[in-house]
Amino acid sequence: MITAWLGAFAFTQAVEAPIYARALRARPRRWLWALGASALTHPIVFFGVPRVWPGGYWSGVAVAEAFAVAAEAVYLTALGVPLSLAWALLANAASAGLGLLSRAAFGWP
């Protein structure tokens, strides 16, 4: 389970961090802050939501992604990023979409 999470986390960071780094372009140490957004939410999305969500897989994905977008938008807002909800939507749509495509094509992450 940890190995699967590490792969999914690395994939998420590879997709989302460059997007968040762009959003944080005016902030010192922007790459550190960019990595922080997903680092805060990914463990909850991967480990927490599947354990507590009573619905099926796709509704769980929707709930997990909605949580990630909302939490990461709050994080970006706290860092002073304008249009934080739009950046969070973009980053999470990119990682979820590419993740689902990668899983369908290669069985990973």
Image (spheres, grey):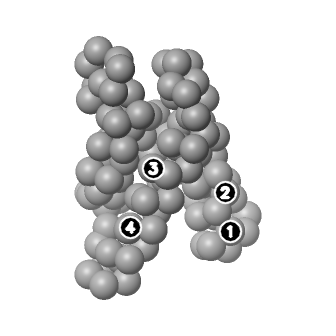
**Towards the viewer: 4 or 25:** 25
Position of residue 27 measured from the top left corner of the image (x, y, whole percent): 35, 18
Marks 3 & 2, CB-CB < 8 Å contact: no
Q: Residues within 10 Å of mark 2 (few under 14, many from 20)?
A: some
Q: Is residue 41 visible?
A: yes
Report which residue position mark 2 lands on.
63
Which is nearer the N-term, disc 3 or disc 2?
2
Which of the numbered marks, if any, corresponds to residue 91?
A: 3
Which kind of residue does numbered mark 4 sit on? Gly
Residue under the point 43% across and 59% down: 94
- What is the C-alpha distance between the residues marked 3 and 2? 16 Å
Residue under the point 37% across and 83% down: 104
Q: How many marks?
A: 4
The answer to which quarter of the image holds residue 86 is top right
Which of the numbered marks, if any, corresponds to residue 59?
A: 1
Q: Is residue 14 left or right of residue 49?
A: left
**Dot 1: what SS?**
helix
Q: Is residue 80 left or right of residue 53?
A: left
- What is the C-alpha distance between the residues marked 1 and 4? 16 Å
- What is the C-alpha distance between the residues marked 2 and 1? 6 Å
Which kind of residue does numbered mark 3 sit on? Ala
Which kind of residue does numbered mark 2 sit on? Val
Which of the numbered marks, if any, corresponds to residue 99?
A: 4
Position of residue 14 measured from the top left corner of the image (x, y, whole percent): 26, 51
**Mark closer to the observer (4, 3):** 3
On screen, 59 above or below 8? below
Position of residue 79 measured from the top left corner of the image (x, y, whole percent): 49, 19
Which is nearer the N-term, disc 1 or disc 3?
1
Position of residue 12 measured from the top left corner of the image (x, y, whole percent): 35, 52
Which is nearer the N-term, disc 1 or disc 4?
1
Marks 4 & 2, CB-CB < 8 Å contact: no
